[in-house]
Image (cartoon, grey):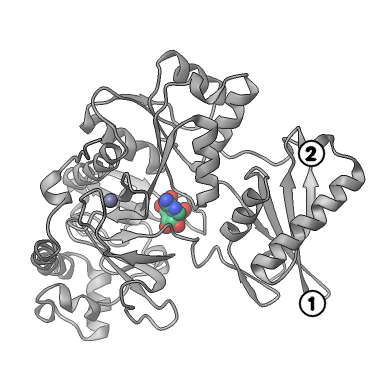
């Protein structure tokens, strides 16, 4: 099938040209921020940098970082760099890791963001013939509005479902023959499970693709969702601070997400030292927005850990690719001194034949960390004998120990006992934080 693009010239622009474009935009953006955004100007002054020091993209590393704490400290207007009268919209983070951050948009900012989402939809095969069911949350969360706007630009019939009410999702999906599903991967898995329960087979729906993001998910989970819905599942990434979903998206090759480099410059840094790392190194992703007017973050530390690659891609897009973030640096738990990401445990569960319905509970007892993993059994697995279940628990704990170097106590629980998520799933309950 011939590859299609939403904005071919930009999406396939040779690297040298992208760099030149980035340089030109960066110089202007730094001046805009210096003139209009006092908190960032202060950070620049503290570092002894002025706009005259930034002559192009090679000078990016001279600029100071912005962290989520900077944004929280300056709440509610934080880095606002235009008069409020120029703003037409706010969105806000989900508050997964603390106080919400509010982001501001001019009409131009909304347009650019929606274009990024349109690129993602076209990369997943979307056209004006498609019926796009958007069941990301609408409202302050960026998922719903972002994909909704992108779908309009592509000209697809857009179903603004928002999240939740799974019965109604399924009814509309079947009656209106939705072809592209947009939601969090955990909700996609839940919709797949609900369809099966209602007696539908994967080929009974009209879906061909799904665009899933807003939370970490593993390759194993991708295969599960693709099988249960009969689709090709594409990843999409973004964060409220940089506009929302669509900062990067997967193409047909599905090996990493292309970052929209005409709007965002990506760097990978060592999270400890802040030093910029060479291509191919794993580290913290940092974004500089080149075109955003109202909320133009320079060198924003995402806390997401991933790897960048400039290897040519078979889809023809030239923009750099980021690997699936393996989790945020603040999702990482340190259990008995070992770094643990929920995604590592998820990968083991799916490999061992369990569904991605699990919860990790960490606590402290007598100065020792306790580590429990609750995993739901499918109805078929649940018919096992008690001794059979105990043996399964031991085997799973062993597999997790092999992966992490430390073993949890595994509790296999009855079907439907772990709460399903309609938005971002809650995978970890760290009770140690409550005692601190
Ligand atoms: P919050 O930080 O409160 O969750 P957002 O709703 O803006 O606010 O979420 C942005 C974060 O969601 C990203 O920094 C990243 O950690 C996570 N995220 C978004 N898309 C993906 C994805 N495709 N894969 C993994 N994580 C993702
Ligand atoms: Zn590609």
| Residue appearing at x 35%, y 71% in the figure | 280
Question: Regarding mark 2 in the picture, which secondary structure is present there?
Answer: loop
Left or right of 70? Residue 293 is: left
Q: How many marks?
A: 2
Residue density around tag 1, few if under 14, some if 14–19, many if 20 or more, within 10 Å: few
Give whichever of 250, 151 is nearer the camera. Answer: 250
Expressed as whole percent of the image width and height from the top left, the position of residue 200 reads 57, 20
Extreme residue in the top direction: 175
| Residue located at (44% from left, 31% from top) | 162
- Cβ(mark 1) to ligand 1 < 8 Å? no
Whether residue 337 sits left or right of residue 101 in the image: it is right
The local secondary structure at tag 1 comes to loop
Pinpoint residue 303: horizontal percent, then vertical percent. 43, 66
**Please, is residue 64 above or below residue 214 in the view?**
below
Is 116 on the left or on the right of 422, as rendered? left
| Contact between labelled residues 2 and 1, with CB atoms less than 8 Å apart | no
How many angstroms separate mark 1 from mark 2 (CA)? 31 Å
Instruction: Tell us which disc is closer to us: 1 or 2.
Output: 2
Q: Position of residue 193 (x, y in %)?
A: 61, 31
Res 367 label: 1
Q: Which mark is residue 414?
A: 2
Instruction: Point out residue 44 in the picture as x, y percentages from the top left corner.
Output: 23, 78
């Amino acid at each position: 099938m011939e590859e299609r693009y939403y904005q071919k010239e930009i999406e396939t622009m040779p690297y040298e040209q992208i760099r030149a474009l980035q340089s030109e935009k960066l110089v202007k953006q730094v001046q805009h921020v210096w003139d209009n955004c006092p908190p960032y100007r202060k950070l620049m002054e503290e570092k002894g940098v002025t706009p005259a020091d930034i002559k192009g993209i090679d000078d990016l590393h001279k600029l100071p970082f912005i962290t989520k704490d900077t944004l929280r400290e300056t709440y509610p207007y934080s880095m606002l760099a235009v008069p409020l009268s120029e703003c037409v919209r706010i969105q806000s983070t989900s508050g997964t890791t603390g106080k919400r951050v509010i982001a501001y948009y001019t009409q131009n900012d909304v347009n650019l963001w929606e274009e990024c989402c349109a690129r993602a939809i076209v990369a997943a095969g979307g056209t004006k013939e498609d019926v796009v069911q958007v069941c990301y949350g609408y409202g302050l969360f960026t998922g719903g509005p972002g994909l909704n706007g992108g779908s309009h630009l592509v000209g697809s019939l857009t179903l603004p479902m928002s999240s939740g009410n799974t019965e109604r999702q399924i009814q509309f999906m079947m009656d209106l023959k939705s072809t592209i599903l947009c939601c969090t991967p955990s909700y996609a898995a839940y919709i797949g499970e609900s369809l099966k329960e209602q007696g539908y087979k994967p080929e009974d729906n009209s879906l061909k693709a799904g665009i899933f993001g807003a939370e970490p998910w593993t390759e194993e989970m991708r295969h599960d969702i693709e099988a249960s819905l009969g689709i090709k599942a594409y990843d999409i990434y973004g964060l409220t601070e940089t506009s929302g979903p669509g900062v990067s998206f997967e193409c047909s090759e599905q090996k990493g997400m292309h970052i929209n480099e005409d709007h965002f410059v990506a760097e990978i840094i060592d999270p400890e030292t802040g030093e910029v790392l060479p291509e191919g190194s794993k580290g913290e992703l940092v974004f500089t927005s080149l075109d955003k007017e109202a909320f133009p973050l320079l060198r924003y530390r995402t806390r997401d850990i991933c790897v960048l690659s400039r290897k040519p891609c078979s889809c023809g897009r030239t923009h750099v690719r980021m690997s699936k973030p393996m989790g945020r640096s603040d999702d990482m738990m340190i259990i008995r001194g070992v770094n643990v990401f929920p995604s590592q445990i998820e990968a083991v569960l799916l490999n061992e034949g369990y569904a991605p319905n699990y919860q990790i509970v960490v606590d402290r007892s007598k100065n020792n960390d306790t580590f429990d993993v609750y995993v739901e059994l499918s109805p078929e697995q649940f018919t096992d004998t008690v001794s059979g279940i105990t043996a399964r628990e031991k085997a799973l704990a062993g597999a997790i120990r092999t992966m992490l170097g430390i073993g949890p106590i595994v509790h296999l629980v009855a079907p439907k006992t772990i709460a399903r998520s309609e938005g971002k799933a809650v995978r970890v309950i760290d009770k140690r934080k409550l005692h601190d």
